[in-house]
Image (spheres, rainbow, N blue to C red):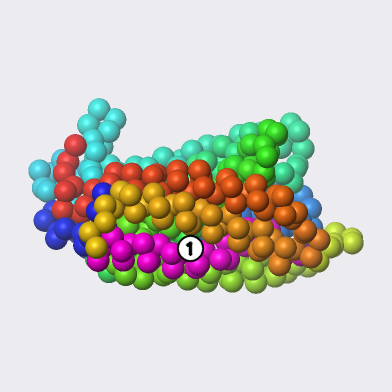
Amino acid sequence: MSIAEPAPVLASDNGTAARIGAWFVVLGTAVTLVGLSWDIQWHDEVGPDTFFTLPHLLLYSGSAISGFACLAMVLIATSAQRAGRPVPRLGGTPIRVFGSNLTAPLGYMVAGAGAALFLLYGLLDLEWHSIYGFDAVLNTPSHVALFLSIALTMIGSIIVFAAHRDHRWGRIGILVAIPILITFAPIPTNALNNLELPADPTILGIVLFGPMLLILGAALLARPGAAVAIAVSLGTMQAILWWFSPWAAETYASAIGLPLRDGLPSGPPQLPAIMPMFLIVAALAVEGLFWLARARGVDAEKIVLVAGVVTGVIVGVSFPLQMNLTHAMSHIAFGDVMTITLFGVPLGLLAGFLGGRFTTMLPAPATEELR
């Protein structure tokens, strides 16, 4: 693993197509995230209505945008390969699939698979609701399958931008794609809610995925200030969703003539409220540790492990504080805080290990070859 500057570009490049494809993929994930936040707020304030609501439309539109962008990039790469031209750099190592009939850049193959699965599992969700009625919980089989599909598309978007991190627009894309996944990654852990765990699985997911993706982004960008920039980007998204979600739910309910629930307790919007507000503190710790690695030649593999533990403990301590600050009825006991903090050590260690490993799994732009 290295946290040094990326190697210079040697592969052929198609700058316009690469930029358009990458930004449309991340646009789709952003639309999906906004739709999800709106949908959760809708269920909290209004209640279930029908499958065909505007929040659901936004959810599925986001996956469709990402999916069509991925398909276009696969067709561009396949056309170049069949014509005997060099396959342009379009979001990762180009891989021949379906009996070598298609040439799919890695990032678009992953993101496209997630988008296709999301639309497929959407049919399962519709069938589930037609049999069992509508629900307002996140851990039904169809919902978990949908969440995993969305996460796959978001992972693909990071791979796409990582393949172009030698360009400024690629680095900016990482600053957008990683906070989106930091926000969303803990949600599939709702599938574990039926297990007897010593702490809420969503909180454990936040303690694991926040540090892991922060370290991954900082290592990919390999520049001073990268971790802080990721934390600032996450905070900006949090502020936007904090305002948008209640406004959209109430405006939409008024437009279609539905009342809000009676006796609604005052509280923050659910999805923005679980975004780690104090990630900036963890980001400053990562900056200091990465500076130490660059300045004193400390082994990068050891640094990411230390960074993982430190950030895991910071998020573990600060998230219960965040809940007590934002939720008037929340009073997380000291024992629970200690439990979450203790979990921050092994989860942070795992986060550092995975963040470092995933960084090495993403090839430098100059190393992309047809496979």
Q: Does the image show residue 322? A: yes
- Quarter holding residue 57: bottom right
- Compared to 195, does 75 lie above or below? below
Q: Residue furthest right?
A: 263
Residue at 50% of width from left, 67% of height from top? 281
Q: Main secondary structure of the magenta part?
A: helix
Seen from the viewer's position, the closer of residues 365 and 198 is: 198
Q: Say which of 18 and 273 sits in front.
A: 273
State yes or no: residue 285 in magenta.
Answer: yes
Question: What is the residue that sits farthest to the top in this orientation?
Answer: 99
Q: Which residues are magenta?
A: 267-295
Q: What residue type is disc 1 on?
A: Ala
Q: Is residue 182 above or below residue 249?
A: above
Residue 350, position in %: x, y?
45, 43
Q: Position of residue 330 (x, y in %)?
A: 77, 59
Q: Is residue 185 visible?
A: no
Which residue occupies the foreground of this view, 7 or 135?
7
Residue drawn at x 26%, y 56% as measured from the top left: 298
* Left or right placement of residue 142 versus residue 62 in this view: right
348 or 203: which is nearer to us? 348
The image shows residue 34 at horizontal and vertical percentages of 57, 60
Using a 10 Å C-alpha cutoff, classify the residue at mark 1 as few (fewer than 14 neighbours), some (14 to 19) or many (20 or more).
Answer: many
Vertical placement of 38 versus 203: above or below? below
User: Does 80 appear in magenta?
Assistant: no
**Which residue shows up at 64% across the image and 36% down it?**
192
Q: Tell me where residue 100 sits by quadrant.
A: top left
**Numbered marks: total:** 1
Residue at image mark 1: 282
SS at mark 1 in the image: helix
At a point 52% along the width and 71% down the height, the residue shown is: 236
Residue 173 placement, left or right of 257: left
Looking at the rendered image, the quarter that the C terminus falls into is top left
